[in-house]
Image (tube, rainbow, N blue to C red):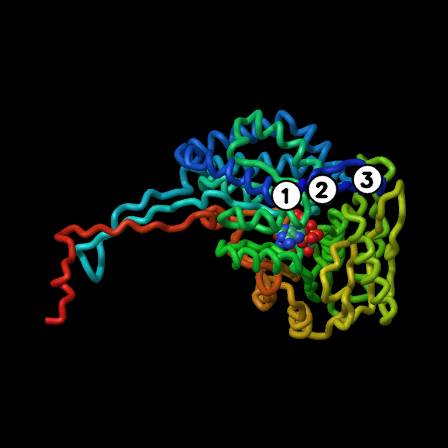
Amino acid sequence: MTKHPRTLPVVNPRTGEPDYEIVAMDADAVAAEARRLRDAQTKWRALGIEGRADAMRGLADALERHADSVAAALEIDTGRRKLARSEVLGVIGSMRGWAALAPTLIDEPDWVQGRAKPNFKHQTELVPYQLVGVISPWNFPITLSFIDAIPAMMAGACALIKPSEVTPRFADALAPVITEAGMADRLSFVQGDGLTGAALIPNIDCVCFTGSVATGRKVALAAAENLIPANLELGGKDPLIVTASADMDAASTLALRASVLATGQACQSIERVYVPRNYYENFISQLTDKAKNISFNFPDISLGDIGPFIFYKQAAIVSGQIDAAKAHGATVLSGGTIERHGGGYWMAPTVIRDVTHDMDIMREETFGPVIPVMAYDTIEEAIALANDTVFGLSGAVFAGSVEEAKAIGQQIDAGAISLMDGALTGQYFEAPKQSFKASGLGGSRMGIEGFRRFFRQKAYIANTTCPLTMKDFSEG
Ligand code: NAD
């Protein structure tokens, strides 16, 4: 039976119209691509860390030469200009940053003399996975395709990336850049949807997945079936606790930015805010005033603060949560409705008061420009509310000092806490962190640990005297 290629339409977030398409790669095509990269891995690894660093610098230079075309494609994918450009520049910086670290990344360990049995000695070799698969989401498409792929490649693995079918244009724009840099036999993309993603897993040695909890569970199960490690970076419901000692003007400014940057479509966005009851009205009124000053980057993409929903289906999820909260007594002070402009779906920063923890808006991931604010009476209550979630991605505390904020942050059950600011894991990638609870699985993608995940330890054990004989183990 002839297999027909599956063509997937891609919607432009600013027009709401499908104006692009991809051909979803089937399982055979994914397997062939994986074999092609595997065939090149021995040579890639043999370059050594310095050789790979040079190649990575070459890729960064090629991407810099073509930054305009890649950013232009990413701009259409995401409906935003400045963030698209800064994503591309960020990936170039990350390639150069990892390359610069090369001399310090791998220690050649010496032989170690056995403690219990001194006639033995051992040496450890770090062996990279041959092929690392990356499955990325639509919210920061190029950043989250490369955040794991770059350290995996520096470790000596080849990388095969499956970008989101919602935002695939940037990957097509990148393909010639990768070829120009001479990297096409060690780094490539497979286009497609969840079926293509599922087809990737049996063909790789380690998966790095960024996306929703629901899909993350499927990926974890498939990885278990194939006995490969799964690094999962999933959703969040990040709390911000503001204390009575905080400057409410600064707190409301940061709450706004950390919630609505990128239209709230960031895993580390602040999705709920807890404020002392005595300061609640003051905080809410400052936040609402500031929220009303945020504008859309429409009709001119180069003006304004926030873009449309990248994925039109997300708009319905966000407005569904807002409507349900309103039906249970919450009050919307700004935004709150889906606006149609130019065919796209938009929402102005939405400040919501009188929320409770029996509303989805306080417990489920929203992934939109929504800031529900709840009053608390004691800091213990605020901490309990912050922890009343299945998620444990990150959180934030704004207090009178870093020390006071940290003491509260220590009681929040999440993998990273921003102190005296919010959503800092989207700005600073050097602090190792892991996702707690349902927000993920696996080692840290941040810091040097993000590199070490891509090795297995191989032991060489030497006997420095005579080989053991059966006599050594005989009963009599
Ligand atoms: P998603 O889970 O719908 O899709 C992510 C990727 O998985 C896509 O490429 C998709 O095609 C692929 N996929 C779908 N089904 C699959 C399957 N069965 N097997 C393999 N791959 C499959 O997520 P999304 O909607 O694209 O992204 C938004 C989500 O990502 C949010 O929940 C957000 O919090 C999360 N996210 C997390 C982080 C983090 O670092 N923790 C960062 C960004 C986004």
Q: Callout 1 environment at 10 Å: few (<14), some (14 to 19), or many (20+)?
A: many
Query: Horizontal and vertical percent for residue 111?
Result: 25, 48
Residue 119, image x, y percentages:
17, 55
Give the side of residue 444 with respect to residue 17, left or right.
left
Q: Are marks 2 and 1 in contact (CB under 8 Å)?
A: yes
Of circles 3 and 1, which is in front? 1
Quadrant of the image for the N terminus? Answer: top right
For marks 2 and 3, give the CA distance. 16 Å
Where residue 167 sits, quadrant-wise, is top right
Local SS, label 1: loop
Residue type for callout 2? Arg
Secondary structure under badge 3?
Answer: strand
What's the mark number on residue 6?
2
Front in this rendered view, residue 448 or 39: 39
Can residue 267 be seen here? The reply is no
Are discs 2 and 3 less than 8 Å apart at CB? no
Labels 3 and 1: the sequence-earlier one: 3
Q: Are marks 3 and 1 in contact (CB under 8 Å)?
A: no
Question: Pointer 3: residues within 10 angstroms few (<14), some, or many (20+)?
Answer: few
Q: In the figure, is residue 410 to the left or right of 82?
A: left
**CB at mark 1 closer than 8 A to ligand 1?**
no
Q: Which residue is mark 1?
A: 26
Q: Residue at label 3?
A: 18
Query: Which is more N-terminal, label 3 or label 2?
Result: 2
